[in-house]
Amino acid sequence: MTWSPESWKSRPIAHAPPYDDADALDEAVTQLKRLPPLVTSFEVERLKSQIAEAQRGERLVLQGGDCAETLDDCTPDVITRKLKILLQMSMVLIHGAQRPVVRIGRFAGQYAKPRSKPLEKQGGKELPSYFGDLVNRAPFDESSRKVDPQLLLEGYKHAGLTLNFIRSLVVSGFADLHHPEYWDLAFLESASLDDELREQYRATVEEVSAALRFMQALGEQTVDELSRVEFFTSHEGLNLYYESSQTRTVPRREGWYDLSTHLPWIGERTRDPDGAHVEFFRGIRNPVGAKVGPTASGDDVIRLLDALNPDDEPGKIVLITRMGAGHIRDGLPPILERVQKEGRTVLWMSDPMHGNTVSTSSGRKTRDFDAVLDEIEGAIAVHQGVGTVFGGVHFELTGDDVTECTGGAEGLTEDDLERNYASLCDPRLNYRQSLEMSFRIARSLQR
């Protein structure tokens, strides 16, 4: 079928923002089409080549960041802390997996969120739901919750500012990777941490330190190259007006590129092969991610692959499983076996966050560290049993000291959640929980 950046408009659109001013929307989209791309096709193709290597087991992918970015969090401190924890986690995973790590941030565009209901009710008052800062704002008042097409432009501008700062940090050799002793390893002193596990963590830190000191001893150029790590961006491609307005052809390359990000992904609720999102993403040259939840069957996944990658191009498809700790060991094997039987080329990643969300007695959403870890360990074991490649992990996390997920060595409980619960949508691992999680995953990979 004929494809264009606008052909998605002929398909049913799941979780579409309720824009009520068509003229204002057209004006915002027209402005976006005239603005420069946020990323380049060269970067997109480089990421695709690295994903192809990860599909063969030659790399591991670490993807992480906020559940939903906000425009107000486009500040140096917030961006720096987010970058720092991803860098530190990647160093631990490199040690554990003995493979290079591809670093992909959920940032510079993660401004849109699906909502199960278009309206939200509080205290007898009903307003549009919060669809992310790309659509409206979080405060529960009429002005903030008004769906505003101009926020498409604000999201673009803040994504550009974020990307510019990240690129500047990376080029300048940001993050003191040569001194893991400066990392916040306070969780190692927790009384709840098993002594054997504590010693394994400390041994890992020392081995990473020794390896970096060795690299430093080799000469200044090698250290500089080690520090200048690559970072790629990703976000859920939920708002198709935003995505299609940044989709264009480029000189000396065939096809269309969505240049709002390197890796857009399709959510569990928008992966219908007959829907607008799959229609849009089947036509772009970017690598594309797709979330796969516990309701998916092998047939569902094959239909999705037929639509998104009929030619089975290496590096093109990332399947991100999000089944929950209680379903991963039974639900994942049939899908892996079906895709393996069909001979399809995909990168398998684990999103252990979304399938393990629970609500407290007060209605606060949270996730338990042990459940998150259990899903990852279950996924690794299933891949080993089936004979497929476990390719990476996908986290909602922050470099800040929030209290949104329970558990971990610091022992956060439900009573601690209100101390610093900052997420506007889903709970994230905080800095120490994220770093501890990387040690636990590295340990599983070593086994």
Image (tube, helix red, strand yellow):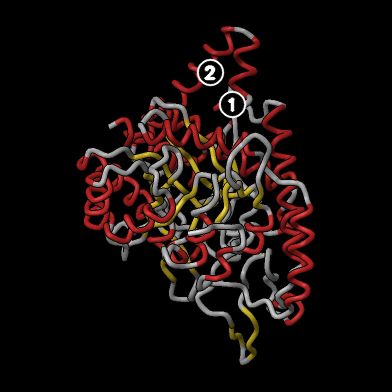
- Left or right? Give the position of 251 relative to 118: right
> Which one is nearer the viewer's eye here, 325 or 429?
325
Q: Is residue 308 above or below residue 145?
A: above
Q: Position of residue 389 (x, y in %)?
A: 31, 37
Q: Which mark is residue 177?
A: 1
Say whether residue 165 is visible. yes
Q: How many marks?
A: 2
Q: Is residue 408 above or below residue 315?
A: below
Helix, strand or loop at disc 2? helix
Q: What amino acid is labelled 1 in the image?
A: Leu
**For the point 58% across and 45% down, which residue is it?**
255
Q: Which mark is residue 276?
A: none
Q: Are marks 1 and 2 in contact (CB under 8 Å)?
A: yes
Q: Which mark is residue 212?
A: 2
- Tag 2 or tag 1, which sits nearer the N-term? 1
Q: Is residue 367 above or below residue 104?
A: below
- Left or right? Give the position of 233 relative to 205: right
Label 1: few (<14), some (14–19) or many (≥20) C-alpha neighbours in 10 Å:
many
User: How many angstroms separate mark 1 from mark 2 (CA)?
Assistant: 8 Å
**For the point 63% across and 66% down, which residue is it?**
132
